[in-house]
Amino acid sequence: MSKEQENLYEGIYVIAANVSDDMRKSLVEKIKTGIESNGGEIVKEHDMGRRRLAYEINKHREGHYLLLYFKALPSLVAELWSEYQITENLLRYMTLRADEVMEKIEFKALQEI
């Protein structure tokens, strides 16, 4: 039987923008605690702030974006996703394997045509 190896993951979370700051902070802590309590390790956190969504999600036009880099076993990702599905005010989430941790997040300006 093979032993699972920890991977580096990049998780992006879109939280409803109409929630209070306290509720948003509580939700961020719930996400981070879910990772850490199951043996994961948070490597880097980027709070990207409130941004306009590309399209409407559940009647929301804006969301608060959070990007987390964390180390965890692959089996943990499925457990986290099942928890995220029932988490209120979490509009979208995505978890990808990452090769490296981005120390700084920058967005390029759109070029005019």
Image: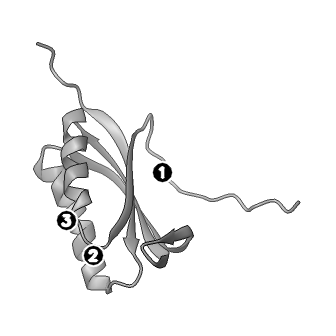
- Residue 3 image position (x, y, % from top left): 15, 20
N-term-proximal mark, 2 vs 3:
2
Badge 2: residue crowd in 10 Å (few <14, some 14–19, many ≥20):
few
- Say how the picture is coloured: one colour
Instruction: Report the amino acid beneath label 1.
Output: Glu
Q: Nearer the viewer, residue 29 or 61?
A: 61
Locate residue 27, reporting x and y percent.
25, 71
* Residue 47 position by quadrant: bottom left
Provide the residue designation for mark 3. Answer: 30
| Left or right side of 107 for 71 | left
Q: Amino acid at mark 3?
A: Lys
Which residue sits at x=75%, y=61%? 110
The answer for how far apart the CA atoms under marks 3 and 1 are is: 23 Å
Residue 59's x, y, as percent? 45, 78
Viewed as shown, does residue 5 lie left or right of 20?
left
Q: CA distance from mark 2 to mark 1?
A: 22 Å
Tell me, for residue 103, which label it has, or none.
1
Q: Is residue 52 above or below residue 82?
A: below
Residue denoted by label 2: 25
Q: What element does badge 3 sit on?
A: helix
Q: How many marks on residues?
A: 3
Q: What residue is shown at x 22% (from left), y 67% (from top)?
A: 29
